[in-house]
Amino acid sequence: MVMNLEQLRGFVEVARLGHFTRASEHLHLAQPSLSRQISTLERELGAELFHRARGHIALTAAGETLLPRAQRMLAEADAIRDEMGELAGLRRGRVRLGAPPTLCISLVAEAISSFHAAHPHVDLHLTEGGSRLLVEQLAVGAVDIALITRSDGPTPAGVSLTHMPLLSEELVVVSSAAAPPVTHGTSISLAHLATLPLIAFDESYELRATMDAAFRDADLTPTLALEGAEMDAVLRFVERGVGVAVVPAMVLFERPTLRSARLSHPSMSRTISLAHRSDVTPAAAVAAMRKVIVSTSAEVARRDPAITSLID
């Protein structure tokens, strides 16, 4: 049997996109060439990998079996390529980092800035998304490491992930610095928060789920001024005095137009972890980025009493 990485990469892309044309465009490959690759792979394996119907592509049982193995092989091959390049003294490499949007504007921005200053020739790729999406991206080898907060979904079958807890971060209430304070002290209760006009995130945000659960457990109904917004829009609405919002403490870094108060009765927090696949050896550049993220996390925790380092 002769099976090469190009065939596997083509198979994985068709499986991911469910479409030969889109997969060939993503791979910068002519569609007939991609079709021949898949047909050759099927002949070598002695099994059809896709059910082909007009306008619809679906994996066969053989394709379902091959997919996770092909993804692991491609991820390991990419790691070997990067590692060999670095060992050859090329002083280059690649890091594919995933992180939620709330961390991209704070911790990730600082870590990438420090890393790029020390390793300017390393290619950096950033994927923004929720924790559940990032776990899936880790599983298929689309990212090397990811900062995740919480994933309610299970880890994909056959995939082992290692999690390193970095920070415990309080959720705080933010309001416009140009408006009168929403509380006389440094903290605000959930009952008081329920009486204020609240700007709520889109329901896809885990922050929204956490906030809704807290109000539900306390038998409180929030006063919603606006809901369904993304992080940047939420902060802009707060700056303009439309209402208040519950956000992670790190969001406040370098935002003098916002005022914050810590939540009490009860408080809310989230744990930030650094995750990577246990079965893939990280390239040197990825290992270096992990060290920078760990050191940056410790520095961030020293600046804000609402953020606690979990690093031993």
Image (spheres, rainbow, N blue to C red):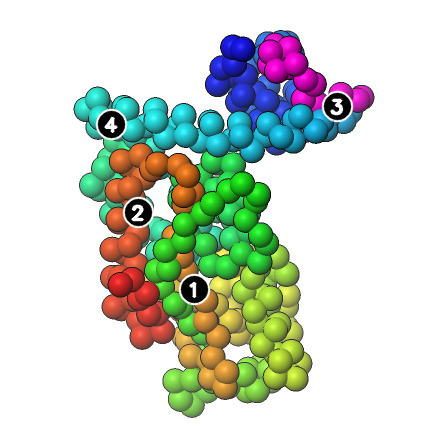
C-alpha separation, residue under disc 1 versus residue under disc 2: 17 Å
Inter-mark Cα distance, 1 to 4: 33 Å
CA–CA distance between discs 1 and 3? 42 Å
Q: Of callouts 1 and 3, which one flags the residue occurring earlier in the amino acid sequence?
A: 3
The quarter of the picture where the C terminus appears is bottom left
Q: Amino acid at mark 3?
A: His
Q: Nearer the viewer, mark 4 or mark 3?
A: 3
Q: Residue at x 32, y 65 (%)?
A: 310
Left or right of 203, for residue 251:
left
The kind of residue on which mark 1 rests is Thr
Q: Which residue is disc 4 drawn over?
A: 86
**Quadrant occupied by the N terminus:** top right
Q: Please tell me which residue lies in front, 36 or 22.
A: 36
Residue 104 seen in render: no
Decide: few, some or many residues near mark 1? Use Cα within 10 Å; few <14, some 14-19, many ≥20: some
Q: Position of residue 214 (x, y in %)?
A: 58, 77
Residue range (magenta)? 40-54
Q: Is residue 213 visible?
A: yes
Residue 134 against residue 4 in the figure, above or below: below
- Please give the count of numbered marks on the rendered protein: 4
Q: Position of residue 10 (x, y in %)?
A: 56, 20
The disc label shown at residue 271, or none? 1
* Dot 4 amino acid type: Glu
Q: CA distance from mark 4 to mark 3?
A: 41 Å
Of marks 2 and 4, which one's residue comes earlier in the chain?
4
Compare marks 1 and 4 and give the one earlier in the sequence. Answer: 4
At horizontal 29% and vertical 41% (from top left) the residue drawn is: 287
> Residue 38 occupies which quadrant of the picture?
top right
Q: Which residue, given by chain and number where applicable, does mark 3 sit on?
A: 51
